[in-house]
Amino acid sequence: MNIRIESLLAGAERAVGAVVIIDVFRAFTTAAVALARGATKIVVVRDVDEALALRAAGVGQLCMGEVGGKRPSGFDLGNSPFEASQADLEGRTIIQRTSAGTQGIVAARQAARLYAGSLVTATATARALLRQGPAEVTLVAMGLEGSRRSDEDELCAIHLRNLLQGRAGSPTGTRDVILAGPQIPAFNDPTKPHLHPGDLEIALDIDRHDFAVLITHEDGRLVARKETV
């Protein structure tokens, strides 16, 4: 198994083989929480207008995501795993749009198999990949808006690489390095209420969930569902 680590939107465009698009803060942590809360599936889109149009057409019941970190007008949920953890999502189809994670999913057109990755599903994602046994794996750290690298996504990619290569990695070390990083104070900044302290707690709860988030094509759309390993 040849494992490559790529970064940002350009990395997603280059990614080949089995691909994991990583967005820890917060898109794919939020997606995992929503699926754990009983959401049937998540339709992944590029644009706010597309998300709203799909909801209006009855493709999904809820729009979830962000622009500039904040919930767009007309959306039902923001890009918050804490908010998703408090919502009634049982049996719902969610339409998700974010500035980094979902952009990477849309851009990963060369992927033979595609996952949405985060620390909360790290071990399950590694197990899913190992079960498939692909010759090529690309781990893509999406960073901030797909254009600037971020500690949490790069470290998640390294942690996944360790697991794929048969090493245990260091969940505690990974968490500690992220907590020392520049984004952390924002989660306790009262001027940024869209960043809930609970988001940070959930996002760094490594292996919180025992499933991977698999992306497939359904009716011409990109759809995320749980893949239990």
Image (spheres, helix red, strand yellow):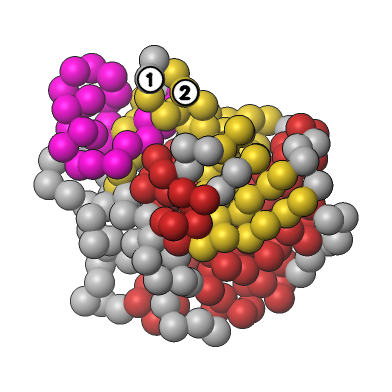
Percent position (x, y) of residue 25? Answer: 44, 61
Q: Is residue 154 above or below residue 20?
A: below
Q: Which residue lies at the image location 53% right of the left edge and 74% below the top edge?
A: 151
Instruction: Write down the quadrant of residue 41 in the picture.
Output: top left
* Marks 2 and 1 in Cβ contact (< 8 Å): yes
Q: Which residue lies at the image location 51% right of the left edge and 26% below the top edge?
A: 216
Percent position (x, y) of residue 229? Answer: 73, 33
Q: Which residue lies at the image location 25% right of the left edge and 72% below the top edge?
A: 192
Q: In this view, does 175 lie above or below 46?
A: below
**Disc 2 marks which residue?**
217
Q: For numbered disc 2, what is the local secondary structure?
A: strand
Give residue 60's mark: none
Q: How far apart are marks 2 and 1 (CA)?
A: 6 Å
Q: Is residue 138 visible?
A: yes
Magenta stretch bounds: 39-64
Give residue 220's mark: 1
Instruction: Write down the quadrant of residue 87 in the picture.
Output: top left
Q: In this view, does 145 lie to the left or right of 175?
A: left
Q: In this view, does 186 lie to the left or right of 156?
A: left
Label 1 Cα neighbours within 10 Å, binned few <14 / some 14-19 / many ≥20: few
Q: For numbered disc 1, what is the local secondary structure?
A: loop
Label 1 amino acid?
Gly
* Residue situated in front as seen by the camera: 193 or 68: 68
* Residue situated in front as seen by the camera: 208 or 171: 171
